Amino acid sequence: MILIDNINILKQIYPATWNKLKEIEKNIDTELIQFEDTKQGNKTIYMEKDGKKSYLHSKYNPIREAETIIDEYRDVDKDTTVIFYGAGLGYHIDLFLERHPDVNYYIYEPIPEVLYNYLSYKSLKRLSSYKLKDIVLGNDESTIRTFINHLIDKSSKDILHVCLNSHINLFPEEYKRFLELFKETIVDKKTSIGVELNFQKKWITNSMKNFGDVLTTPNILLEKRGEFKGKPALIVSAGPSLNEEIENIRYIKEKGLAYIFSVGSAIRTLLHYNIHPHVVCTYDPKPGNHWIYKGIKDKRISEIAMIYGSSVGYETIIDYPGERYHMITSQDTVAGYYLKNKDNSEINIVYDAPSIAVVTIQLLYELGFSPIILVGQNLGYKGEKAYSDGLKYKENITEEQREKAISVVDVYGEKILTSEVFNAMRQQIEHYIRVLPNINVINTTKGGVHIEGTEFIELKKIMDENLKQPIVEANWLEGSKTAYDLDYLIVQKDKMDKSYYKALKINKDYNTILDKIVKSINNRNFSQAENLYIKLDKELRKIENNDFYKTFILPMNRVEYKLLADSIDRLNDIKDPYEKGNIIVEKFRNFMKLCTKNIEEIEPIYKELKKRIEKYMGGS
């Protein structure tokens, strides 16, 4: 009966867990976990391990055992989010909640058989009177990562792990993997939020300022997609091992044995040795990105083409002497709004990544190049160096960098040091190698990190065995500018103008509602305040559906907007209506001030964008 009632609760409230259990119920080993009566009259469970019974709870007094576990957690703030790792039969969960009834909590169980027995023994009805957020069956990596991401997003303060130690002893590998993924996800989250905070405004303002150039240069992914099938290409990066391959690269370029794409700062090393690659690829939104190409601009070197991501620092493409080609990036909401192909086909994009090398791998794959040959892709420290010669602003690694370094395996199977940033780049390369069908990536980087999915072959050996014939064609990138749908562009321009003026009205109405809420809560008229919250929510929906906000303002404040959205979920937990009202006003007012400021800041950029579109329309 308990199991049936719990299944109904899972179906209604925790459907994701119910669906997972339903998928694997035929494979659950009902003999793995067994019930046994204790001397105190309670139940315990055990499993056979190494020829003897291993218990998840005391076989004498599981209640007293639970008290010993919970005694460690005396001072727990009510804003703490608790993960009960290992459900067992829930004795420790029940006792903890009796002492700390106000915490939000999750029950996390990685072993399906244990969760099945828990649901057979313990009714969920009573637990729902506490703040049970979810029951998670963490038996695969995707579920674990999704859970941890959700947990971090929804937790306002501390996260506390309350673990059933016997569970960890019986299933150590599952706990080890959980902790690894938890740490990885926190690092990824911090990195992601840091990147977004640093670049969220630059991505949008750059995309606006670059839009005129996007309209008048070829889209490389539209014009040349699949045209270089089976042709070898080098991605040259600025790792210290690049120094050892300079003469090999020079020979490959002079003989036309492969197409050479320089990424990031590698162009400075190549120019230092008087080597001109076929292409430089760039996407970095930082204002200082253009200094990397100073040597090309100062010497007016026109033979090196540039392929740039549409959200790149706008200074980068100004006065660039070579041919320019663009690729739309995933961070560019501007092109996504205004542009459409004449045949209604999808406009291919490249996805933002921690490194231009990762973006270029996506690009070369779509163009058909194979194999893609990585050169100077160390992604780790080589002795005292992290970068190649010719980069005057790159010093040897510091003592602080060495202390913060993590250990990874290199192409020879030896341990080397790297940074968290380099490691994230490696993981992204490995991700694309996994998901892009039939991609062929060769890593030639001597002493570089091992990149899963690549084969390590020294560049000289590849030259001797594979790069024997000239394959580089003259004018290989030549093509007309991409003709986007002009009628669609005109329609979108007019729609955006109307949305701009609607956005200004929304701002005014939004602030009026906030003023009324302040008046209501100060007068202790909380029922009126509740009605105003509904109006405020409707106004927020208008913001989310307004083209000007969706294209420019919300992407410029994606971190703050997500924090606002996540905080709305937690407002329901606030019991004091006065406190709740003040928090709502503060959070929503601050967000609107930020948006209003951004609208004022980008107004001249928006006007310039309209002029560029009108100029393009007049010349087409």
Image (cartoon, rainbow, N blue to C red):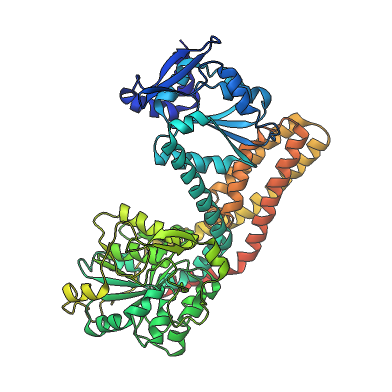
Image coordinates for residue 326, horizontal then vertical, percent: 39, 70
Q: Residue at x 58, y 57 (%)?
A: 553
Residue sitting nearer the eye, 216 or 70: 70
Can I make out residue 278 in this image? no
Above or below for 172 versus 620 = above
Q: Residue at x 29, y 80 (%)?
A: 249
Residue sitting nearer the eye, 262 or 298: 262
Q: Residue at x 56, y 47 (%)?
A: 544
Can I make out residue 455 in this image? yes
Image coordinates for residue 19, horizontal then vertical, percent: 39, 28
Q: Residue at x 29, y 55 (%)?
A: 436
> Relative to residue 45, is residue 538 drawn left or right?
right
Q: Residue furthest front?
A: 51
Q: Quadrant of the C terminus?
A: bottom left
Q: Residue furthest right?
A: 523
Above or below for 87 versus 160 = above
> Relative to residue 221, is residue 548 drawn left or right?
right
